[in-house]
Image (cartoon, rainbow, N blue to C red):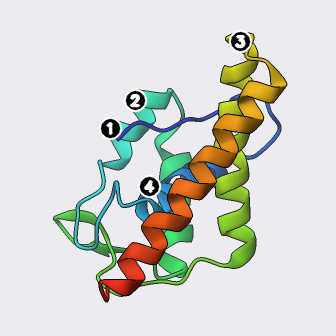
């Protein structure tokens, strides 16, 4: 699992870890019942103290998002946990910010970016309508 963590933005690392895991669950990268990497693995990957990762896991467990099974590890909860509107907005906002940064690095024209964004929204609406009609 790849976590996008910033050591300089002022947001506590444990909070960023928890947010990234929630995002992975929300987008389906992590599925219910799936085992998370060990505390030590994540700590080594992002070069932080294992206690920081453990704190993130405890926060997620307190929210019912993950469950720790003694001797086997930490798993995404089988119970579907609703993500608040605010959390969803933050997650999507973060993705949009990344896309805008990338577009800026690519020197994409604002009108081209707007056209592309509107095109994606239309495709998303079509897909949503098709799924609704198909009973998904």
Circle 4 packing at 10 Å, graded few (<14), some (14-19), many (20+), is: some
**Residue that numbered label 1 is attached to:** 41
Q: Nearer the viewer, residue 36 or 117?
A: 117
Q: Which residue does the image show at 29% across and 48% down from the upper left?
A: 37
Q: Is residue 59 above or below residue 39?
A: below
**Which residue is identified by label 3?**
105
Residue topped by disc 4: 24
Name the residue tied to disc 2.
44
Q: Earlier in the sequence, mark 4 or mark 1?
A: 4
CA–CA distance between discs 4 and 2? Answer: 19 Å
Is disc 4 in contact with disc 3, using a CB cutoff of under 8 Å? no
Disc nearer the start of the sequence (3/2):
2
Task: Kindly state the secondary structure of the residue where label 2 is placed.
Answer: helix
Q: Is residue 125 above or below residue 20?
A: below
Horizontally, residue 42 falls left or right of residue 93, namely left
Q: Are marks 4 and 1 in contact (CB under 8 Å)?
A: no
Residue in the image at 69% along x and 47% along y: 118
Q: Secondary structure at mark 3?
A: helix
Image quadrant for the N terminus?
Answer: top left
Neighbourhood count class around disc 1 (C-alpha, 10 Å): few under 14, some 14–19, many 20 upward: some
Of residues 24 and 71, the one drawn nearer to the viewer in this rendering = 24
Q: Is residue 77 visible?
A: yes
Choose mark 4 or mark 3, whichever is in front: 3
Distance CA(mark 1)–CA(mark 3)? 32 Å
Q: CA distance from mark 4 to mark 3?
A: 25 Å
For the residues labelled 3 and 2, the Cα–Cα distance comes to: 30 Å
Image coordinates for residue 102, horizontal then vertical, percent: 66, 22
């Amino acid at each position: 699992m790849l976590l996008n963590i910033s050591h300089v933005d002022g947001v506590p690392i444990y909070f960023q870890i928890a947010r990234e895991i929630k995002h992975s669950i929300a987008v389906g990268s992590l599925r219910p019942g799936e085992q998370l990497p060990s505390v030590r693995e994540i700590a080594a990957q992002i070069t932080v103290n294992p206690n920081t990762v453990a704190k993130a896991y405890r926060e997620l467990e307190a929210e019912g998002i993950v469950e720790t099974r003694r001797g086997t590890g930490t798993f995404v909860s089988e119970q579907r946990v609703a993500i608040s509107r605010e959390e969803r907005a933050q997650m999507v906002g973060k993705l949009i910010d990344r896309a805008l940064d990338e577009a800026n690095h690519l020197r994409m024209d604002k009108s081209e970016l707007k056209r592309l964004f509107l095109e994606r929204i239309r495709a998303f609406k079509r897909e949503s309508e098709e799924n609704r009609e198909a009973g998904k």
